[in-house]
C-alpha cells in the first residue's frame, strides 16, 4: 500500500472519529475538557509543522488535519460550556506547549519541539484522565480507540522514520489505549454511577 494511500486512510479515520464526536458535543452527550483539547490542538499543529520539516511527507498530513479539527473541538467545548474547569496545572501545560517553539527556533532541530510537545500532549491527557476517572461515561471509548488505530496507520504512512516523525503518533496511540483501559475499568467499577 502506498504512503499516500495510507495517509488518505488515516485522514478518513480522523474524519470518521471526529464527526460523531463533534455531533456528541453539540448534543451534550459528551463533555470534553476544553483545556485538554486546546493543548492537544496547539501541540498537534506544531508537531505537524515539525514533521513536515523532518520530511514526514504524506504521513504528516493526517496530523495536520487532526490538529485543525482538535482546535475546533476545543472551541466547541468552550462554546457548549462542556468542562471548562481550568487549573493552574492546565495553564502550566499550555505554557510548556508554547515553550517548544523557542527550543525549535534556537536549536534549528524539530526533534526538540516534538520531544517537548509529545510530553506536553501526554500531560494534556491529565484533565481528561481526571474527568474520566470520576465520570467514566463522559468520554467515548470508540473515539479514542479510533485514534489509537489512526496513529498506528500514520506511522505506516510516514515517508521518513525518525524520532522526529514517529515519537508523537506512537506516544499518543499508547496514551489513547491507556485512557480506554481506565474508562472501561471505571465503568465496570462504578456500575451504579449516574451518567455525567
Image: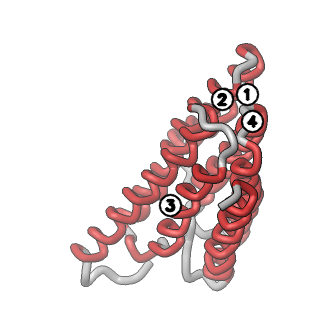
The mark lying in front, picked from 1 and 4, is 4
Per the image, label 4 sits on a secondary structure element best described as: loop
The residue most toward the front is: 1
Q: Mark number for residue 101?
A: 1
Mark 1 Cα shell of 10 Å, populated few (<14), some (14-19), many (≥20): some
Q: Residues within 10 Å of mark 3 (few under 14, many from 20)?
A: many
Query: Circle 4 is placed at which residue position?
Result: 55
> Based on the displayed image, in which of its 4 quarters is residue 78 positioned?
bottom right
Q: Is residue 30 above or below residue 182?
A: below
Note whether residue 74 is visible: no
Cα distance in 3D space between marks 1 and 4: 18 Å
Are dots 3 and 4 in contact, CB under 8 Å?
no
Whether residue 92 is visible: yes
- Residue 180's quadrant in the figure? bottom left
How many angstroms separate mark 2 from mark 4 (CA)? 15 Å
State which tag comes first along the sequence, 3 or 4: 4
Q: Which residue is mark 2?
A: 113
Q: Determine contact: label 1, label 2, CB under 8 Å.
A: yes
The residue at the point 58 percent across, 62 percent down is 150
Query: Circle 3 is placed at which residue position?
Result: 148
Amino acid at each position: 500500500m502506498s504512503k499516500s494511500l495510507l495517509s488518505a486512510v488515516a485522514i478518513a479515520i480522523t474524519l470518521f472519529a471526529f464527526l460523531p464526536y463533534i455531533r456528541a458535543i453539540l448534543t451534550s452527550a459528551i463533555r470534553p475538557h476544553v483545556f485538554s483539547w486546546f493543548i492537544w490542538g496547539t501541540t498537534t499543529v506544531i508537531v505537524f509543522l515539525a514533521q513536515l520539516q523532518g520530511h514526514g511527507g504524506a504521513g504528516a498530513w493526517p496530523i495536520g488535519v487532526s490538529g485543525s479539527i482538535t482546535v475546533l473541538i476545543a472551541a466547541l467545548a468552550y462554546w457548549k460550556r462542556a468542562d471548562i474547569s481550568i487549573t493552574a496545572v492546565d495553564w502550566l501545560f499550555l505554557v510548556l506547549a508554547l515553550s517548544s517553539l523557542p527550543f525549535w527556533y534556537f536549536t534549528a532541530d524539530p526533534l526538540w519541539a516534538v520531544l517537548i510537545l509529545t510530553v506536553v500532549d501526554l500531560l494534556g491527557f491529565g484533565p481528561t484522565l481526571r474527568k474520566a476517572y470520576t465520570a467514566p461515561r463522559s468520554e467515548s471509548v470508540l473515539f479514542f480507540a479510533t485514534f489509537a488505530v489512526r496513529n498506528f496507520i500514520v506511522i505506516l504512512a510516514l515517508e521518513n522514520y525518525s524520532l522526529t516523525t514517529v515519537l508523537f503518533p506512537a506516544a499518543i496511540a499508547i496514551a489513547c489505549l491507556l485512557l480506554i483501559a481506565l474508562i472501561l475499568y471505571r465503568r465496570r467499577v462504578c456500575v451504579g454511577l449516574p451518567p455525567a
